[in-house]
Image (tube, rainbow, N blue to C red):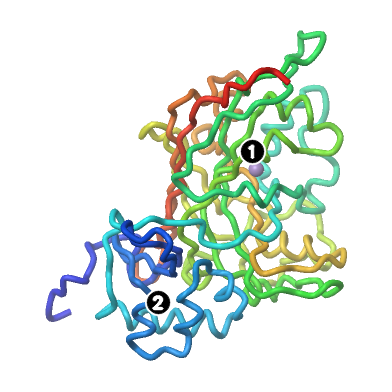
């Protein structure tokens, strides 16, 4: 490059021209004026204003308070807009991140959470069910998941009120009610559905990129004491439904082309709709870092996940269920084989705690290898635990 432009970023900035995630922002002085922006370094490109100035055919899709219309527009439009955005970096309006308010970037339709890390499932199985096999007999034949609560998905930066509920310690004769004493995190990766699919048209592994728009970090806050008492036999419920935090930025799948990687070798042959042995590599080499109050507690490797997002989407729709724009599914806790790669405190402390204290700030960040040595950053997901609501016992 012959001339240094003030718009160029520092070497190695994970939010350069190869990343370009989408979010919804409003200027700090006009909170009702939500529109779509693209992160570039530590600034936000006002994509709506840039599109209007350039006479883009997609200006209307970008002048919206949510990403959903862009999500619904389909992959050819996603690719066209991404190419246009690259061109707008030269002269489009850039606002410092600290001068804007970031909002939940999309309206969540349905939310599903999976359980795709063999290391996590094995560790949790040992802790929650010490007298039986850690992995249930179905685990390596289908991606296990549960339906979460879409309405309590919140954007990064939202405080998390310590949940209340029924808890029963193993030595207690009866349950008690009160604030969770074992509030935990789960470091996960989420996938945002753009193109819908009608009922009874399962999404094949090879059609994943036609339907999934992008990727973000997720913290699936979990009240382990509530969860342990309630989860048998139907799975997580109130122990997780109080809050799920997501990044303010959704990074398009196309940004991860160089980071694609083969998942671990499969233990058993898979049924044809899940068999990815001949498919393009479905894993993503994302390196996650978890900090609590600024101190790194774990570095979970997403490349180690047994089930891929394409397999999860295929499984979610194989029974005939339809898919909607804004459907959101998360990977399940990402844990690697090493003790310092575990994605939740339950595993990091072998079930003994300590868990989160009021005032703790949990932040997840991640990056993936990009073209020419560039880093592809994922927008952080951060949240602070605040004291329980203090209501009287019902
Ligand atoms: Mn989870």
Q: Report the disc number at residue 202.
A: none
Query: CA separation, marks 1 and 2?
Result: 33 Å
Q: Is residue 47 left or right of residue 148?
A: left
- Note whether residue 336 is visible: no
- Note whether residue 116 is visible: yes
Query: In the image shown, does 328 or 391 lie closer to the viewer?
Result: 391
Residue at x 77% of width, y 49% of height? 144
Which element is circle 2 on?
helix
Q: Where residue 81 sits in the image (x, y, percent)? A: 46, 82
Vertical order, 263 against 179 (above or below): below
Q: Are marks 1 and 2 in contact (CB under 8 Å)?
A: no
Q: Is residue 179 left or right of residue 248?
A: right
Reading the image, the residue beneath label 1 is 242
Q: Where residue 161 sits in the image (x, y, percent)? A: 54, 32
Vertical order, 371 against 296 (above or below): below
Vertical order, 258 against 303 (above or below): below
Residue at x 80% of width, y 65% of height? 317
Vertical order, 232 against 38 (above or below): above
Toward the left, the furthest residue is 3
Q: Report the disc number at residue 48.
A: 2
- Residue 38, quarter of picture: bottom left
Residue at x 68% of width, y 65% of height? 310
Query: In the image shown, does 310 or 323 lie closer to the viewer?
Result: 323
Which element is circle 1 on?
loop
Q: Where residue 341 sits in the image (x, y, percent)? A: 52, 38
């Amino acid at each position: 490059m012959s001339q240094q432009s003030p718009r160029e970023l520092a070497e190695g900035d994970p939010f350069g021209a190869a990343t370009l995630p989408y979010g919804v922002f409003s200027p700090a002085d006009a909170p009702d004026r939500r529109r779509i922006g693209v992160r570039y370094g530590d600034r936000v490109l006002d994509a709506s204003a840039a599109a209007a100035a350039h006479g883009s055919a997609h200006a209307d899709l970008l002048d919206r308070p949510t990403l959903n219309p862009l999500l619904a527009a389909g992959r050819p439009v996603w690719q066209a807009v991404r190419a246009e955005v690259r061109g707008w970096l030269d002269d489009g309006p850039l606002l410092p991140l600290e001068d804007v308010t970031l909002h939940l970037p999309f309206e969540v339709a349905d939310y599903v959470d999976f359980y795709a890390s063999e290391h996590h499932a094995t560790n949790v199985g040992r802790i929650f069910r010490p007298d039986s096999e850690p992995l249930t007999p179905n685990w390596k034949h289908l991606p296990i998941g549960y339906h979460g609560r879409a309405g309590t998905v919140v954007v990064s930066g939202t405080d998390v009120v310590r949940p209340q509920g029924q808890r029963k310690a193993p030595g207690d004769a009866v349950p008690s009610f009160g604030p969770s004493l074992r509030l935990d995190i789960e470091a996960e990766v989420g996938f945002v559905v753009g193109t819908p699919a009608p009922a009874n048209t399962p999404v094949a592994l090879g059609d994943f990129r036609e339907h999934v728009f992008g990727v973000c970090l997720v913290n699936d806050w979990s009240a382990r004491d509530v969860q342990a008492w309630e989860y048998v036999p139907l799975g997580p419920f109130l122990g997780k439904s109080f809050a799920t935090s997501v990044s303010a930025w959704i990074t398009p799948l196309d940004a991860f082309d160089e980071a694609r990687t083969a998942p671990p070798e499969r233990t058993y042959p898979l049924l044809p709709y899940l068999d990815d042995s001949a498919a393009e590599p479905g894993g993503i080499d994302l390196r996650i870092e978890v900090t609590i109050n600024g101190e790194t507690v774990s570095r979970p490797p997403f490349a180690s996940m047994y089930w891929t997002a394409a397999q999860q989407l295929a499984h979610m729709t194989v029974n005939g269920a339809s898919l909607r724009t804004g459907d959101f599914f998360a990977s399940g806790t990402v844990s690697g084989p090493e003790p310092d790669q575990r994605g939740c405190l339950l595993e990091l402390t072998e079930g003994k705690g300590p868990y989160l204290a009021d005032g703790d700030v949990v932040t997840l960040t991640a990056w993936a290898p990009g073209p020419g040595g560039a880093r592809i950053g994922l927008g952080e997901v951060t949240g602070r635990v605040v004291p329980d609501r203090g209501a009287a016992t019902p």
